[in-house]
Amino acid sequence: KDKMIIVESALLFESGLNKDMDYVILVYANKKNRIKRIMERDGSNKKDIEKIMKHQFDDKKNMENSDFVLVNNKDFDNLESQVEFLVKVLNALK
């Protein structure tokens, strides 16, 4: 039975690790949601978060370089259903 290995990396393209992947899946959230979630998770301030984001590739470039894009602007259940569908797609591609 084939297995999937998932690699999480905020800097996948910047590090060049994408070249070692069969498929790249981008989990995208708009900037407003990302900042809000990071502030809630880490207690970071908006200014520091934006400074870090300036060193990352922009959203458009990340989307263009990804094989699949999951949009994570809603709740967890919405993202979970997208992941379940994508797993079916990936299994069909084996």
Image (cartoon, rainbow, N blue to C red):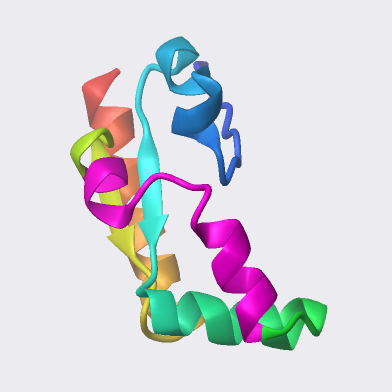
Is-magenta flag for residue 74?
Answer: no
Query: How many numbered markers are drawn?
Result: 0
Residue at 41%, 70% (x, y): give it: 79
Q: Quick check: 18 above or below 30?
A: above
> Which stretch appears magenta?
46-63
Q: Main secondary structure of the magenta part?
A: helix
Q: Quick check: 31 above or below 92?
A: below
Q: Quick check: 31 above or below 7?
A: below
Is-magenta flag for residue 61?
Answer: yes
Residue at 63%, 79% (x, y): give it: 47
Residue nearest the observer in this picture, 7 or 59: 59
Residue nearest the observer in this picture, 52 or 88: 52
Residue at 44%, 18% (x, y): give it: 21
Q: Where's residue 66, x and y in %?
A: 28, 36
Answer with the quarter of the image where residue 25 lies.
top left
Answer with the quarter of the image where residue 72 lies.
bottom left
Q: Is residue 37 left or right of residue 20?
A: right
Q: Where's residue 61, x and y in %?
A: 25, 42
Q: Where's residue 52, x and y in %?
A: 61, 59
Q: Is residue 2 left or right of residue 78?
A: right
Answer with the quarter of the image where residue 43 lies.
bottom right
Rendered-image quadrant of the C terminus: top left
Residue nearest the observer in this picture, 47 or 22: 47
Q: Is residue 45 left or right of residue 31?
A: right
Residue at 62%, 84% (x, y): give it: 46
Q: Where's residue 56, x and y in %?
A: 48, 47
